[in-house]
Image: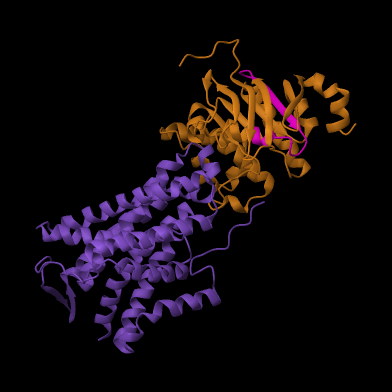
Amino acid sequence: MSEPKMSEPLLSLRDLRIGYGGATEAVKGVSLEVRAGAVVCLIGANGAGKTTILRCLSGLLRPRGGSVHFKGRDIGGMAAHRIAALGLVQAPEGRQVFANMTIAENLRMGAWLLKDRAEEARRRDMVLTRFPRLSERIRQLAGLLSGGEQQMLAMGRAMMADPQMLLLDEPSMGLAPLFVEEIFRIIAELKAEGRTILLVEQNAQAALDIADHAYVLQSGRIELSGPAAEIARNEKVVAAYLGG
Amino acid sequence: MFAQQLVNGLVVGSTYALFALGFTLMFGVLGVINLTYGFYLSVGAFLALFATQHGVSIWLALPLAALASGCVAVLIDGLLLTPLRRAKAPELASLMVTLGATLLLYSLANAALSTDIRRFPPGVIDANALEIAGIRITMTQCLIIAAAGIIVSVLLWVMNGARIGLGLRALAERPDAAALMGVNAGALVRLVSLASGTLAGASGVLIGLNYNAIQPYMGEVMMLKGFAVIILGGLGDIRGALVAGLVVGMLETLTAGYVASSWKDAVGFVLLVLTLWIRPSGLFGRLAVKRA
């Protein structure tokens, strides 16, 4: 496998179609690109197909048609654990922390594929520095954390894999405003470190503020795409998603 | 004499605990009630019987027969349940499929082996007994307690101390999230099938030795007790299966000794009903932690 050239996107979707059995498709031909080092956001109303796309990218759903390439490699329909091993890691919608495990154990699970214990400890220190709240409760069961803390844990767990690209599905959903601010501050930090992120958000304003590039998804199709700043000024977007 | 009864109860309880551990492991991690589970007990008992009839020592026959039962479990799980898992079929589907398979497997075993009770060849295990402070412990009983102790220790260490146990717990709780972390669910499912089939097989050999009676349906009888034990312990809970197995075995033995042996088999089911009335989540079952 050759390393992708600078000009090639890290992740590219071509005419991706996904369905849940039956004739109707939740995603009806989506093309999208994410370049290394970029933060790209995918916004759209509830049910537009954002989560479906992310689940497919991570191998939890098989595509019905089209292609998905990561690092130049076709990953459409590849098993989830193999996609994670390639460095495409997701913090899923609804946090999905392991409630019956401690925070420490959740973080260990994030480094499941890592064999090097010293490296695991180093990453854990980095995550705990970034999320001091987790550090205070390291031996607590994750199920006892608040929603915001669970989101931090879900992101910290994904960071334990030291991913080449991070998929964040609705990281601010259902959180108190203070936590929303905190989560976006952390995404900004990750961006400043040069991490590649595909961010799915209902909080379109915050997502557009942070992203380089944006795609607007409507009923399974890309309605609009462009630099995030331009999308944020688009009249239709303002009317539909930014409460203008 | 009471101390003697306690030792006998510990022996019976150890075999129950082993059997229940495999069942609860399968349910806890794979999330299915696999009714073919009892069949692996019969497989283990018969394989050990045949091996010892061909002159293999019981010390070698026990681990080999147990592991072979585990392999049968992997095979059957792969044939019956993997396709259902892939199709995300409802739980009822796996219950029905394993029910059908159980009936078929026992009929085949019955046709091939008949329901005659078979016994291990004489001298398969040293007939002498230890006598400690007036309590008689046969070599068979020593073997059962030692084997159960070793197997249970290894299992507890794997589930709580080893990295693989962490992955199993993750898979049990959230299969999707575990896959996102890079957990190879298919491989772990096979590992769990192997481990639980091995536990059933080992308990089959030990139960066969304890009563020196082997016949195809012995797994089916244990299956009912297995249900009582894992519900008493808390479905899917490892410690629960261990403690409940010992408790049921002990109470059965004491009932047989001090009440009447005809009441012995009722013990498990009385406990089952009491558990469901008083504490449906079982001794160790916890209410699911509410997710935000």
| Quarter that holds the N terminus of chain B | bottom left
Percent x, y for residue A131? Answer: 62, 38
User: Residue B195, relative to residue A27: is it above or below?
Assistant: below
- Chain B as rendered: colour: purple
User: Residue A180, relative to residue B250: is it above or below?
Assistant: above
The magenta span reads: A34-53
Percent x, y for residue A121? Answer: 47, 36
**Residue under the point 29% across and 60% down:** B108
Residue B47 falls inside the magenta stretch = no
Q: Is residue B205 left or right of residue B289?
A: left
**Residue under the point 58% across and 36% down:** A61
Which chain does orange denote in the image?
A
Near-viewer residue (B288 or B51)? B51
Q: Is residue B25 left or right of residue A180?
A: left
User: Residue A149, relative to residue A221: is it above or below?
Assistant: below
Residue that sits furthest to the bottom in the current view:
B259
Near-viewer residue (B67 or A187)? B67
Q: Is residue B148 visible?
A: no
User: Residue A175, relative to residue B66: is it above or below?
Assistant: above
The picture quadrant where one finds residue A239 is: top right
Residue A38 falls inside the magenta stretch = yes
Near-viewer residue (A141 or A158)? A158
